[in-house]
Amino acid sequence: MMKLAQKLALPSLAVLIGVTSFFATSCSKQEGAQAQSAPVSDIPTVAVARTASENLTHDLILTAEFRPFQEIDVMAKVAGYIREINVDVGDHVKENQLLATLEIPEMGDDLRRADASVQRSQADVQHAKDEIQRSQAARDIAQLSFNRLTEVSKKRPGLVAQQEIDDAQSKYLVADAQVSAANSALAAAGQQVAVNNSDVARVKTLMDYTRVTAPFAGVITKRYADKGSMIQAGTASQTQAMPVVRLSENSLLRLILPVPESSVSTVHIGQQVAVRVPTLNRSFPGKVARFSDKLALATRTMDTEVDVQNPSLILIPGMYAEVDLSLARRTGVLAIPVTAVDADNDNSATNGTHGTSTSGQVMVITPNNRVEVRKIALGLETANRVEVLSGLNEGDMVVIGGRAALQPGMEVHPKVTSMVAAKQ
């Protein structure tokens, strides 16, 4: 019986050892598989940008509408009927070109009357000259008689009565006074000729006003009168006289921009600006030509005028335009994306070269791929770039993505992102 029991126990022990070996082998394979599937590291990847030298420009976009450089209602200086009108709406005219002709019949009579006055005054001058000759002859005779009586009285005293000598002297003095009067009459007649000539010139000048001409080159934008219309004299701005036409100078246009108070100090005469016309999808060069040099109290803005050349007349007054006014420019400065900076709200400094600057902080990726928080001084800021005054070097990598989960000293995988700079 003992031997039989030992024989039965040996196969059972072998089975038990086999089962145990199977489970042991299975467990070791599962543990190896689990060990191989576990991640080796958990290092995050962050988007970074490199600090680079760039040209930065701070621009201000303002909207305005084109206005003619000059626009006037052409008035008639004298009243009359329009005999001919030579232009219509849309006509391009040159300076001094004839626009209309007035008919004033009574002005011809005024000219003839003025000419007659000149002729009469000239006749008065001739009469005064003749009177001078007559009075001079009478004075010469009176002087001769006085001199003869005086000589006889000296040579033969008592022969000529003293009364005769006195009468001769008196006649001489009267004749001399008449000569002076004749000279005065001649001078007065000459002055009257000048006065009458002035009247003639005045009437001729008024007759010249019957020709209504263009004071400058431009475009006829409105026509008020037709042939035969009665035009009143536009001699004062208070009168309700009807103009002949409206003339607009469109070869040069102006834009009146309301520049904010904060940007007034950056505006200067001659400053070049870019003028974009959305309706034409084109840009044109402009120039700051003048400004009011005074702020409007209601809006705290200063009117600034930009002149835009329009030789082809493609621009039309009334069109809207966007003016890109450059307020500040930096050349060859270190710049980083705005999204990389956490600015300090309560920290500002004054820099002698760049003016007032602010400070902030950025996360820099070190050469061994570690996160480092660094303080920097900031200068000019544009739409998507900001100038770095100090704290960074060219080529440094700054984090531009989310930084909430990053800590100083953390190891990361930097991925350089190419940020397209805004239009400078």
Image (cartoon, grey):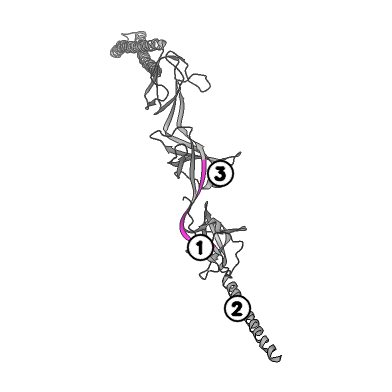
Question: In screen coordinates, is 388 left or right of 226?
Answer: right
Q: Position of residue 330 (x, y in %)?
A: 47, 54
Mark 2 surroundings: few (<14), some (14-19) or many (≥20) residues within 10 A: few
Where residue 87 appears, x then y in whole percent? Answer: 39, 21
Magenta residue span: 46-62
- Packing grade of label 1 (10 A; few <14, some 14-19, many >=20) is few
Q: CA distance from mark 1 to mark 2?
A: 45 Å
Q: Nearer the viewer, mark 2 or mark 3?
A: 2
**Along the viewing direction, whichever of 90 and 157 lies nearer the viewer:** 90
Q: Residue furthest right?
A: 1
State whether residue 257 is above or below residue 419. above
- List x then y, in percent, for residue 135: 33, 11
- The label on residue 358 is none
Is residue 362 a member of the stretch shown in magenta? Answer: no
Q: Quadrant of residue 250?
A: top left
Q: What residue is at 53 percent from the left and 66 percent from the top?
A: 413
Q: Label 3: state its secondary structure.
A: strand
Q: Which residue is mark 2?
A: 25
Q: Point out the frontmost of discs 3 and 1.
A: 1
Q: Residue at x 38, y 34 (%)?
A: 312
For residue 67, side relative to residue 344 (left or right): left
Identify the residue position indicated by label 3 in the image: 260
Provide the residue designation for mark 1. 415
Please report whichever mark, 1 or 2, sits nearer to the chain's N-terminal start. Answer: 2
